[in-house]
Image: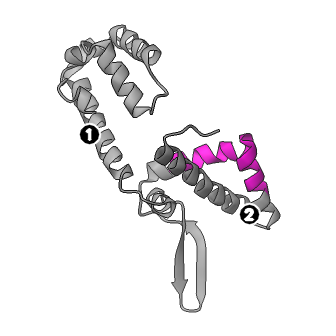
Amino acid sequence: MELLANYTTPEEMLSVDTQTLVDLLNKTSHGYLGLGKAVEIQQTAKNSFGITLASSSFALIIRQYLEQLKSLESSIKKFSSVPKLVAYAGIYPKSRQSGESKSDGRMSKRVSPYLRRAVWLATSVAAFKDPTLSAFYQKKRDEGKKHLTAIGHVCHKVLAIIFAVLRDNKPYI
């Protein structure tokens, strides 16, 4: 993000040389994105009519997104274990107790609803499309877990995979 910190207006952002954008994409995507995506972004930005209509608004939004990305990157470096990432994402049941009754069924609402929803939606698809996750989901169902509970277990596994991918800087296979 430091690479684009000096570019504050849309015109300046559009003038970023291709190699700087390639370096940024390569760094932030851990080598997945490069020259092709940089050229695509630059062409799309140059052909976008909205840039000239509300350039100061777009500049402010882009700066805010860059700040959010910086914040998220620093937050990610605080995660030293899978349980910490799971807790941050809110993919754990919240215990509630009143007198003798106890409930463990609902997800915690004290974290980012956007992250929790993104993980939940991705997992809802992956649980039926990815063979490993599908087998894990079916195992939980065979243990007598309800659908949503089994998806919650798969969410935990997906976060463990994400943690390993980020920690080891290797793609998920």
Mark 1 lies on a secondary structure that is helix
Query: Residue beneath label 2, please?
Result: 146
Which amino acid type is shown beneath numbered disc 1? Glu
Which amino acid type is shown beneath numbered disc 2? Lys
Is residue 159 left or right of 43 when viewed as pictured?
right
Is residue 88 left or right of 119 when viewed as pictured?
left
Quadrant hosting residue 43: top left
Query: Residue beneath label 1, please?
Result: 67
Mark 2 lies on a secondary structure that is loop
Hey, which residue is sitting farthest right in the picture? 142
Q: Tag 1: Cα neighbours inside 10 Å, few (<14), some, or many (≥20)?
A: some
Report the magenta residues as a range. 117-138
135 is higher (above) or lower (below) than 105:
above
Residue 54 is one of the magenta-drawn residues: no
Residue 123 is one of the magenta-drawn residues: yes
Q: Quadrant of the C terminus?
A: top right
Is residue 128 left or right of 68 when viewed as pictured?
right
Q: Position of residue 36 (x, y in %)?
A: 46, 14
Rendered image coloring scheme: one colour
Nearer to us in this view, 143 or 168: 168
On residue 83, which mark appears? none
Nearer to us in this view, 49 or 167: 167
Q: Position of residue 149 (x, y in %)?
A: 67, 63
In whole angstroms, how far apart are the C-alphas of marks 1 and 2? 40 Å
Of discs 1 and 2, which sits in the foreground?
1
Quadrant hosting residue 60: top left
Magenta part, dominant SS: helix
Q: Position of residue 131 (x, y in %)?
A: 75, 43
Give the residue at x 26% y 39%: 67
Q: Quadrant of the N terminus?
A: top left
